[in-house]
Amino acid sequence: MRILIVDDSPLICRQINEIINSMEMNWEIWMVDTGEKAIELIDKNDIDIVFLDIVLPGISGFDVLKFVRRIKEYGDVYVIVMTSLDDDEVIKESFSLGANDFIRKPINQVELTYRLRAAVRLRNYQYLYKSALNDLQEKNKELIELTKKLKETQDVLIQNEKMSAIGQLAAGIAHEINNPLGFVITNIETLGKYIEKFKKIIEEYDKVSKSICSDNQIDMEGVIENCKRISELKKQLKFDFMVEDIDQLLDETMDGLRRVSHIVQSLKRFARSGLDGQASYEDLNDIIEETLLIARNELKYDIEVIKEYGEIRQIYCNRGEIGQVILNILINAAQAIKSQPNRTQKSHIWIKTWEDSDFVYCSIKDDGPGIKRIYLNKIFEPFFTTKDVGKGTGLGLSISYDIIVNKHGGDIWAESEEGSGATFVFKLPIRSKLLENQI
Protein backbone atom coordinates (compact mmCIF):
# COMPACT_ATOMS: atom_id res chain seq x y z
CA MET A 1 0.00 0.00 0.00
CA ARG A 2 1.52 3.35 -1.08
CA ILE A 3 0.90 6.36 1.16
CA LEU A 4 1.83 9.99 0.43
CA ILE A 5 2.02 12.55 3.26
CA VAL A 6 1.79 16.18 2.05
CA ASP A 7 2.56 18.71 4.81
CA ASP A 8 5.05 21.55 5.19
CA SER A 9 5.57 20.67 8.86
CA PRO A 10 8.36 18.06 9.40
CA LEU A 11 6.91 17.40 12.84
CA ILE A 12 3.49 16.50 11.44
CA CYS A 13 5.05 14.31 8.72
CA ARG A 14 7.16 12.47 11.27
CA GLN A 15 4.20 12.00 13.63
CA ILE A 16 2.00 10.53 10.89
CA ASN A 17 4.85 8.34 9.67
CA GLU A 18 5.38 6.89 13.18
CA ILE A 19 1.67 6.22 13.64
CA ILE A 20 1.51 4.42 10.28
CA ASN A 21 4.60 2.31 11.00
CA SER A 22 3.21 1.34 14.39
CA MET A 23 0.36 -0.42 12.61
CA GLU A 24 2.84 -3.04 11.35
CA MET A 25 1.50 -3.35 7.82
CA ASN A 26 3.28 -3.45 4.48
CA TRP A 27 3.56 0.28 3.74
CA GLU A 28 5.51 2.34 1.24
CA ILE A 29 5.50 5.87 2.66
CA TRP A 30 6.47 9.06 0.83
CA MET A 31 6.60 12.54 2.34
CA VAL A 32 6.69 15.93 0.58
CA ASP A 33 6.36 19.49 1.87
CA THR A 34 4.83 21.32 -1.13
CA GLY A 35 1.84 20.93 -3.41
CA GLU A 36 4.09 21.00 -6.49
CA LYS A 37 6.04 17.97 -5.32
CA ALA A 38 2.83 16.18 -4.45
CA ILE A 39 1.43 16.74 -7.95
CA GLU A 40 4.65 15.47 -9.55
CA LEU A 41 4.62 12.28 -7.46
CA ILE A 42 0.91 11.59 -7.99
CA ASP A 43 1.26 12.18 -11.73
CA LYS A 44 4.04 9.60 -12.12
CA ASN A 45 3.11 6.97 -9.50
CA ASP A 46 0.18 4.91 -8.35
CA ILE A 47 -0.63 6.32 -4.93
CA ASP A 48 -3.28 4.63 -2.80
CA ILE A 49 -3.79 7.07 0.10
CA VAL A 50 -2.89 10.75 0.44
CA PHE A 51 -2.76 12.71 3.71
CA LEU A 52 -3.15 16.24 2.33
CA ASP A 53 -2.67 19.48 4.27
CA ILE A 54 -4.84 22.34 2.98
CA VAL A 55 -2.47 25.20 3.85
CA LEU A 56 0.79 24.71 1.90
CA PRO A 57 3.47 27.03 0.57
CA GLY A 58 2.88 27.76 -3.09
CA ILE A 59 -0.17 26.00 -4.44
CA SER A 60 -2.74 25.00 -1.84
CA GLY A 61 -4.07 21.60 -0.89
CA PHE A 62 -7.26 22.51 -2.77
CA ASP A 63 -5.24 22.83 -5.99
CA VAL A 64 -3.63 19.45 -5.37
CA LEU A 65 -7.05 17.93 -4.75
CA LYS A 66 -8.38 19.40 -8.00
CA PHE A 67 -5.41 17.92 -9.87
CA VAL A 68 -5.91 14.48 -8.31
CA ARG A 69 -9.56 14.31 -9.29
CA ARG A 70 -8.80 15.59 -12.79
CA ILE A 71 -6.25 12.89 -13.68
CA LYS A 72 -7.33 9.99 -11.46
CA GLU A 73 -10.60 8.12 -11.18
CA TYR A 74 -12.43 8.79 -7.92
CA GLY A 75 -11.69 5.29 -6.62
CA ASP A 76 -8.00 5.33 -7.57
CA VAL A 77 -6.75 7.65 -4.80
CA TYR A 78 -8.18 7.96 -1.30
CA VAL A 79 -7.60 11.54 -0.06
CA ILE A 80 -7.71 12.43 3.63
CA VAL A 81 -7.65 16.20 4.11
CA MET A 82 -5.80 17.64 7.15
CA THR A 83 -6.42 21.13 8.50
CA SER A 84 -5.97 23.20 11.62
CA LEU A 85 -8.51 25.74 10.38
CA ASP A 86 -11.59 25.84 12.57
CA ASP A 87 -13.90 26.59 9.68
CA ASP A 88 -16.59 24.23 8.41
CA GLU A 89 -16.49 25.93 5.00
CA VAL A 90 -13.02 24.44 4.48
CA ILE A 91 -14.42 20.97 5.11
CA LYS A 92 -17.35 21.61 2.77
CA GLU A 93 -15.01 22.84 0.03
CA SER A 94 -12.74 19.82 0.50
CA PHE A 95 -15.57 17.31 0.04
CA SER A 96 -17.00 19.24 -2.90
CA LEU A 97 -13.61 18.91 -4.65
CA GLY A 98 -13.45 15.16 -4.04
CA ALA A 99 -11.94 14.52 -0.62
CA ASN A 100 -12.83 11.18 0.98
CA ASP A 101 -12.24 12.04 4.63
CA PHE A 102 -10.68 14.71 6.91
CA ILE A 103 -8.66 15.00 10.12
CA ARG A 104 -8.30 18.12 12.23
CA LYS A 105 -4.93 19.15 13.60
CA PRO A 106 -3.32 18.59 16.01
CA ILE A 107 -3.25 14.91 14.97
CA ASN A 108 -4.89 12.44 17.32
CA GLN A 109 -3.24 9.01 17.08
CA VAL A 110 -6.41 6.99 17.70
CA GLU A 111 -8.42 9.04 15.21
CA LEU A 112 -5.76 8.79 12.50
CA THR A 113 -5.30 5.05 13.08
CA TYR A 114 -8.98 4.21 12.64
CA ARG A 115 -9.46 6.55 9.70
CA LEU A 116 -6.44 4.99 8.00
CA ARG A 117 -7.76 1.49 8.63
CA ALA A 118 -11.07 2.52 7.06
CA ALA A 119 -9.18 3.92 4.06
CA VAL A 120 -7.16 0.71 3.67
CA ARG A 121 -10.28 -1.39 3.91
CA LEU A 122 -11.98 0.69 1.22
CA ARG A 123 -8.92 0.53 -1.07
CA ASN A 124 -8.88 -3.25 -0.74
CA TYR A 125 -12.54 -3.36 -1.69
CA GLN A 126 -11.72 -1.19 -4.70
CA TYR A 127 -8.99 -3.56 -5.79
CA LEU A 128 -11.38 -6.49 -5.53
CA TYR A 129 -13.96 -4.52 -7.49
CA LYS A 130 -11.48 -3.76 -10.28
CA SER A 131 -10.41 -7.38 -10.41
CA ALA A 132 -14.02 -8.50 -10.64
CA LEU A 133 -14.70 -5.84 -13.28
CA ASN A 134 -11.78 -7.07 -15.39
CA ASP A 135 -13.05 -10.63 -15.10
CA LEU A 136 -16.50 -9.44 -16.09
CA GLN A 137 -15.14 -7.62 -19.13
CA GLU A 138 -13.33 -10.78 -20.24
CA LYS A 139 -16.46 -12.82 -19.78
CA ASN A 140 -18.40 -10.17 -21.67
CA LYS A 141 -16.05 -10.58 -24.63
CA GLU A 142 -16.63 -14.31 -24.50
CA LEU A 143 -20.37 -13.68 -24.31
CA ILE A 144 -20.25 -11.42 -27.36
CA GLU A 145 -18.53 -14.18 -29.31
CA LEU A 146 -21.07 -16.71 -28.09
CA THR A 147 -23.94 -14.40 -29.03
CA LYS A 148 -22.49 -14.05 -32.50
CA LYS A 149 -22.44 -17.81 -32.90
CA LEU A 150 -25.98 -18.08 -31.57
CA LYS A 151 -27.20 -15.53 -34.10
CA GLU A 152 -25.61 -17.54 -36.88
CA THR A 153 -27.75 -20.54 -35.89
CA GLN A 154 -30.90 -18.54 -35.12
CA ASP A 155 -32.63 -19.26 -38.42
CA VAL A 156 -32.04 -22.97 -38.02
CA LEU A 157 -33.42 -22.93 -34.47
CA ILE A 158 -36.49 -20.94 -35.52
CA GLN A 159 -37.29 -23.39 -38.29
CA ASN A 160 -36.77 -26.32 -35.93
CA GLU A 161 -39.15 -24.74 -33.43
CA LYS A 162 -41.81 -24.39 -36.09
CA MET A 163 -41.36 -27.98 -37.20
CA SER A 164 -41.54 -29.04 -33.57
CA ALA A 165 -44.85 -27.23 -33.16
CA ILE A 166 -46.21 -28.85 -36.30
CA GLY A 167 -45.02 -32.25 -35.08
CA GLN A 168 -46.65 -31.67 -31.69
CA LEU A 169 -49.93 -30.77 -33.37
CA ALA A 170 -49.79 -33.53 -35.96
CA ALA A 171 -51.11 -36.18 -33.56
CA GLY A 172 -53.98 -33.93 -32.52
CA ILE A 173 -54.76 -33.01 -36.12
CA ALA A 174 -54.75 -36.70 -37.04
CA HIS A 175 -57.30 -37.22 -34.28
CA GLU A 176 -59.38 -34.34 -35.64
CA ILE A 177 -59.27 -35.90 -39.11
CA ASN A 178 -60.21 -39.33 -37.75
CA ASN A 179 -63.55 -38.09 -36.43
CA PRO A 180 -65.09 -36.92 -39.73
CA LEU A 181 -63.21 -39.59 -41.63
CA GLY A 182 -64.72 -42.24 -39.34
CA PHE A 183 -68.33 -41.38 -40.12
CA VAL A 184 -67.48 -40.82 -43.80
CA ILE A 185 -66.23 -44.41 -43.96
CA THR A 186 -69.28 -45.62 -42.03
CA ASN A 187 -71.62 -43.74 -44.36
CA ILE A 188 -69.92 -45.14 -47.44
CA GLU A 189 -70.20 -48.66 -46.03
CA THR A 190 -73.93 -48.04 -45.43
CA LEU A 191 -74.33 -46.67 -48.96
CA GLY A 192 -72.61 -49.79 -50.25
CA LYS A 193 -75.19 -51.98 -48.45
CA TYR A 194 -78.01 -49.81 -49.84
CA ILE A 195 -76.65 -50.24 -53.35
CA GLU A 196 -76.69 -54.04 -52.95
CA LYS A 197 -80.36 -53.86 -51.90
CA PHE A 198 -81.17 -51.52 -54.80
CA LYS A 199 -79.57 -54.04 -57.15
CA LYS A 200 -81.92 -56.77 -55.93
CA ILE A 201 -84.95 -54.54 -56.48
CA ILE A 202 -83.68 -53.47 -59.91
CA GLU A 203 -83.20 -57.14 -60.87
CA GLU A 204 -86.88 -57.80 -60.10
CA TYR A 205 -87.95 -54.76 -62.12
CA ASP A 206 -85.74 -56.01 -64.94
CA LYS A 207 -87.58 -59.35 -64.97
CA VAL A 208 -90.90 -57.57 -65.27
CA SER A 209 -89.54 -55.35 -68.02
CA LYS A 210 -88.28 -58.29 -70.02
CA SER A 211 -91.57 -60.15 -69.73
CA ILE A 212 -93.49 -57.13 -70.99
CA CYS A 213 -91.11 -56.39 -73.85
CA SER A 214 -90.91 -59.97 -75.12
CA ASP A 215 -92.65 -61.07 -78.38
CA ASN A 216 -94.71 -63.66 -76.50
CA GLN A 217 -98.16 -62.92 -75.28
CA ILE A 218 -98.04 -60.89 -72.07
CA ASP A 219 -99.01 -62.85 -68.97
CA MET A 220 -100.74 -60.09 -67.02
CA GLU A 221 -101.32 -62.31 -64.05
CA GLY A 222 -97.57 -63.05 -63.97
CA VAL A 223 -96.75 -59.36 -64.25
CA ILE A 224 -99.09 -58.53 -61.42
CA GLU A 225 -97.60 -61.29 -59.34
CA ASN A 226 -94.08 -60.00 -60.01
CA CYS A 227 -95.12 -56.48 -59.05
CA LYS A 228 -96.53 -57.78 -55.79
CA ARG A 229 -93.27 -59.60 -55.18
CA ILE A 230 -91.31 -56.39 -55.86
CA SER A 231 -93.55 -54.50 -53.47
CA GLU A 232 -92.94 -57.08 -50.76
CA LEU A 233 -89.23 -57.01 -51.44
CA LYS A 234 -89.15 -53.20 -51.13
CA LYS A 235 -90.91 -53.43 -47.78
CA GLN A 236 -88.55 -56.16 -46.68
CA LEU A 237 -85.49 -54.11 -47.70
CA LYS A 238 -86.98 -50.86 -46.28
CA PHE A 239 -86.77 -49.11 -49.62
CA ASP A 240 -88.57 -45.91 -48.56
CA PHE A 241 -86.25 -45.46 -45.57
CA MET A 242 -83.18 -45.98 -47.79
CA VAL A 243 -84.37 -43.35 -50.25
CA GLU A 244 -84.84 -40.82 -47.45
CA ASP A 245 -81.57 -41.78 -45.73
CA ILE A 246 -79.42 -41.51 -48.84
CA ASP A 247 -79.66 -37.70 -48.99
CA GLN A 248 -78.68 -37.38 -45.34
CA LEU A 249 -75.79 -39.82 -45.76
CA LEU A 250 -74.49 -37.90 -48.77
CA ASP A 251 -74.77 -34.56 -46.95
CA GLU A 252 -72.93 -35.92 -43.91
CA THR A 253 -70.27 -37.49 -46.09
CA MET A 254 -69.66 -34.29 -48.03
CA ASP A 255 -69.54 -32.29 -44.78
CA GLY A 256 -66.98 -34.70 -43.31
CA LEU A 257 -64.84 -34.60 -46.44
CA ARG A 258 -64.96 -30.79 -46.44
CA ARG A 259 -63.82 -30.77 -42.79
CA VAL A 260 -60.94 -33.10 -43.59
CA SER A 261 -60.00 -30.98 -46.60
CA HIS A 262 -60.18 -27.78 -44.55
CA ILE A 263 -57.92 -29.19 -41.83
CA VAL A 264 -55.40 -30.51 -44.35
CA GLN A 265 -55.36 -27.25 -46.30
CA SER A 266 -54.97 -25.20 -43.11
CA LEU A 267 -52.08 -27.36 -41.93
CA LYS A 268 -50.47 -27.21 -45.37
CA ARG A 269 -50.75 -23.43 -45.49
CA PHE A 270 -49.45 -23.08 -41.93
CA ALA A 271 -46.48 -25.37 -42.62
CA ARG A 272 -45.48 -23.71 -45.88
CA SER A 273 -46.35 -20.07 -45.19
CA GLY A 274 -43.45 -18.12 -43.85
CA LEU A 275 -40.84 -20.30 -45.51
CA ASP A 276 -41.17 -18.46 -48.82
CA GLY A 277 -41.38 -15.01 -47.22
CA GLN A 278 -44.56 -14.21 -49.16
CA ALA A 279 -46.91 -11.59 -47.75
CA SER A 280 -50.40 -10.52 -48.76
CA TYR A 281 -53.46 -8.68 -47.50
CA GLU A 282 -55.11 -10.87 -44.89
CA ASP A 283 -58.00 -10.75 -42.43
CA LEU A 284 -56.64 -11.33 -38.92
CA ASN A 285 -59.97 -12.86 -37.84
CA ASP A 286 -59.63 -15.50 -40.59
CA ILE A 287 -56.06 -16.29 -39.49
CA ILE A 288 -57.27 -16.77 -35.91
CA GLU A 289 -60.08 -19.10 -37.03
CA GLU A 290 -57.68 -21.17 -39.12
CA THR A 291 -55.21 -21.41 -36.25
CA LEU A 292 -57.97 -22.43 -33.84
CA LEU A 293 -58.83 -25.25 -36.22
CA ILE A 294 -55.24 -26.49 -36.16
CA ALA A 295 -55.06 -26.20 -32.35
CA ARG A 296 -58.60 -27.50 -31.76
CA ASN A 297 -57.51 -30.81 -30.30
CA GLU A 298 -55.34 -28.96 -27.72
CA LEU A 299 -58.34 -26.95 -26.56
CA LYS A 300 -61.65 -28.72 -27.12
CA TYR A 301 -61.78 -31.09 -24.15
CA ASP A 302 -60.71 -28.74 -21.37
CA ILE A 303 -61.14 -25.19 -22.59
CA GLU A 304 -63.97 -23.05 -23.94
CA VAL A 305 -62.81 -20.45 -26.45
CA ILE A 306 -64.83 -17.23 -26.35
CA LYS A 307 -64.36 -15.05 -29.43
CA GLU A 308 -65.09 -11.34 -29.76
CA TYR A 309 -64.07 -10.34 -33.27
CA GLY A 310 -64.21 -6.69 -34.21
CA GLU A 311 -64.74 -5.22 -37.65
CA ILE A 312 -61.14 -4.75 -38.71
CA ARG A 313 -59.36 -3.88 -41.90
CA GLN A 314 -57.11 -6.29 -43.72
CA ILE A 315 -53.41 -6.06 -42.97
CA TYR A 316 -50.44 -6.76 -45.18
CA CYS A 317 -48.63 -9.60 -43.44
CA ASN A 318 -47.11 -13.03 -43.75
CA ARG A 319 -50.13 -15.19 -42.95
CA GLY A 320 -48.15 -18.22 -41.79
CA GLU A 321 -45.93 -16.20 -39.46
CA ILE A 322 -48.88 -14.45 -37.80
CA GLY A 323 -50.57 -17.84 -37.47
CA GLN A 324 -47.45 -19.15 -35.78
CA VAL A 325 -47.58 -16.30 -33.22
CA ILE A 326 -51.24 -17.02 -32.43
CA LEU A 327 -50.54 -20.76 -32.21
CA ASN A 328 -47.62 -20.23 -29.81
CA ILE A 329 -49.78 -18.13 -27.49
CA LEU A 330 -52.71 -20.56 -27.65
CA ILE A 331 -50.54 -23.59 -26.90
CA ASN A 332 -48.86 -21.78 -24.00
CA ALA A 333 -52.27 -20.83 -22.60
CA ALA A 334 -53.61 -24.38 -22.96
CA GLN A 335 -50.55 -25.91 -21.31
CA ALA A 336 -50.67 -23.38 -18.47
CA ILE A 337 -54.34 -24.19 -17.82
CA LYS A 338 -53.68 -27.94 -17.92
CA SER A 339 -50.80 -27.51 -15.45
CA GLN A 340 -53.37 -26.90 -12.69
CA PRO A 341 -54.01 -30.43 -11.39
CA ASN A 342 -56.65 -29.46 -8.83
CA ARG A 343 -58.70 -27.22 -11.09
CA THR A 344 -62.43 -28.03 -11.03
CA GLN A 345 -63.96 -25.03 -12.81
CA LYS A 346 -64.40 -24.76 -16.57
CA SER A 347 -61.40 -23.18 -18.28
CA HIS A 348 -61.64 -20.32 -20.75
CA ILE A 349 -59.63 -18.51 -23.37
CA TRP A 350 -60.92 -15.15 -24.59
CA ILE A 351 -59.84 -13.88 -28.02
CA LYS A 352 -60.62 -10.31 -28.99
CA THR A 353 -59.72 -8.19 -32.03
CA TRP A 354 -60.14 -4.46 -32.64
CA GLU A 355 -58.45 -1.59 -34.44
CA ASP A 356 -57.60 2.08 -34.21
CA SER A 357 -56.43 4.47 -36.89
CA ASP A 358 -52.98 2.88 -37.25
CA PHE A 359 -53.05 -0.66 -35.86
CA VAL A 360 -55.06 -3.86 -35.71
CA TYR A 361 -54.99 -5.48 -32.25
CA CYS A 362 -55.46 -8.99 -30.91
CA SER A 363 -55.61 -10.03 -27.26
CA ILE A 364 -55.58 -13.64 -26.07
CA LYS A 365 -56.50 -14.02 -22.40
CA ASP A 366 -56.64 -17.18 -20.29
CA ASP A 367 -57.76 -17.95 -16.75
CA GLY A 368 -54.75 -20.14 -15.98
CA PRO A 369 -52.23 -19.76 -13.15
CA GLY A 370 -50.75 -16.53 -14.53
CA ILE A 371 -47.12 -15.47 -14.85
CA LYS A 372 -44.89 -14.52 -11.95
CA ARG A 373 -43.96 -10.84 -11.98
CA ILE A 374 -40.24 -11.66 -12.02
CA TYR A 375 -40.73 -13.52 -15.31
CA LEU A 376 -42.73 -10.88 -17.21
CA ASN A 377 -39.63 -9.07 -18.46
CA LYS A 378 -37.95 -12.33 -19.51
CA ILE A 379 -40.62 -14.31 -21.33
CA PHE A 380 -39.68 -12.96 -24.78
CA GLU A 381 -35.97 -13.73 -24.29
CA PRO A 382 -34.55 -16.62 -26.35
CA PHE A 383 -34.39 -19.96 -24.51
CA PHE A 384 -36.26 -18.64 -21.45
CA THR A 385 -38.84 -21.18 -20.26
CA THR A 386 -40.51 -22.14 -17.00
CA LYS A 387 -41.51 -25.56 -18.34
CA ASP A 388 -39.88 -28.79 -17.25
CA VAL A 389 -36.82 -30.00 -19.11
CA GLY A 390 -37.83 -31.56 -22.42
CA LYS A 391 -41.22 -29.81 -22.54
CA GLY A 392 -40.17 -26.50 -24.04
CA THR A 393 -37.27 -24.91 -25.90
CA GLY A 394 -37.96 -21.34 -24.79
CA LEU A 395 -38.06 -20.15 -28.40
CA GLY A 396 -41.81 -19.87 -29.04
CA LEU A 397 -42.36 -16.39 -27.59
CA SER A 398 -38.94 -15.20 -28.73
CA ILE A 399 -39.88 -16.14 -32.29
CA SER A 400 -43.26 -14.45 -31.83
CA TYR A 401 -41.54 -11.24 -30.71
CA ASP A 402 -39.23 -11.33 -33.71
CA ILE A 403 -42.15 -11.88 -36.11
CA ILE A 404 -44.38 -9.13 -34.68
CA VAL A 405 -41.79 -6.47 -33.81
CA ASN A 406 -38.83 -6.94 -36.14
CA LYS A 407 -40.52 -8.35 -39.24
CA HIS A 408 -43.92 -6.64 -39.18
CA GLY A 409 -43.16 -3.43 -37.27
CA GLY A 410 -45.76 -4.07 -34.58
CA ASP A 411 -45.52 -4.75 -30.86
CA ILE A 412 -46.33 -7.57 -28.44
CA TRP A 413 -46.55 -7.61 -24.65
CA ALA A 414 -47.91 -9.64 -21.76
CA GLU A 415 -50.02 -8.63 -18.77
CA SER A 416 -50.48 -10.93 -15.80
CA GLU A 417 -50.99 -11.29 -12.09
CA GLU A 418 -49.93 -14.59 -10.56
CA GLY A 419 -53.04 -16.66 -9.89
CA SER A 420 -55.26 -14.53 -12.18
CA GLY A 421 -54.39 -15.74 -15.67
CA ALA A 422 -52.37 -14.06 -18.39
CA THR A 423 -53.15 -11.81 -21.35
CA PHE A 424 -50.99 -11.51 -24.45
CA VAL A 425 -51.63 -8.56 -26.72
CA PHE A 426 -50.08 -7.84 -30.08
CA LYS A 427 -50.70 -5.13 -32.63
CA LEU A 428 -49.91 -5.00 -36.33
CA PRO A 429 -49.71 -1.81 -38.38
CA ILE A 430 -52.35 -1.13 -41.01
CA ARG A 431 -49.51 -0.05 -43.30
CA SER A 432 -47.09 -2.87 -42.74
CA LYS A 433 -43.31 -2.68 -42.58
CA LEU A 434 -43.32 -5.53 -45.12
CA LEU A 435 -45.23 -3.41 -47.63
CA GLU A 436 -42.92 -0.42 -47.10
CA ASN A 437 -39.93 -2.63 -47.83
CA GLN A 438 -41.43 -3.53 -51.21
CA ILE A 439 -42.07 0.06 -52.30
Image (cartoon, helix red, strand yellow):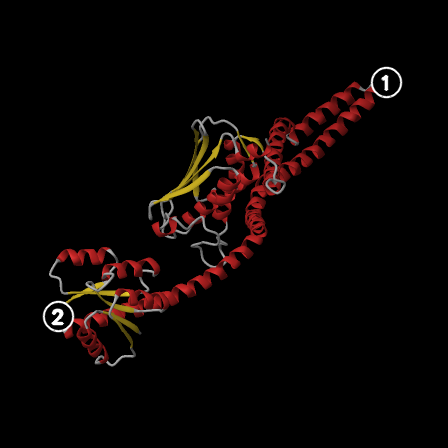
Q: Which residue is mark 2?
A: 106
- Would you say residue 296 is visible in this rendering? no
Question: Crowdedness of circle 2 by 10 Å Cα count: few (<14), some, many (20+)?
Answer: few
**Residue at horizontal 45 percent and vertical 29 percent from the top:** 358
Q: Which mark is residue 333?
A: none
Q: Is residue 312 above or below residue 171?
A: above
Direction from residue 427 to residue 67 in the image, left or right: left
Direction from residue 225 to residue 21 in the image, left or right: left
**Is the N terminus in the top left, top right, bottom left or bottom right quadrant?**
bottom left
Q: Which badge, 1 or 2, is on the more N-terminal residue?
A: 2
Question: Crowdedness of circle 1 by 10 Å Cα count: few (<14), some, many (20+)?
Answer: few
Q: Amino acid at mark 1?
A: Gln
Pinpoint residue 398: horizontal percent, then vertical percent: 48, 48
Q: Which residue is mark 1?
A: 217
Q: In the structure shown, which secondary structural element does the residue marked by tag 1 occupy?
A: loop
Of residues 137 and 199, the one drawn nearer to the viewer in this rendering: 137
Extreme residue toward the left, this view: 86
Question: Picture quarter containing residue 316?
Answer: top right
Pinpoint residue 38: horizontal percent, then vertical percent: 29, 67
- Would you say residue 356 is visible in this rendering? yes
Direction from residue 365 to residue 8 in the image, left or right: left
Question: Picture quarter containing residue 364?
Answer: top left
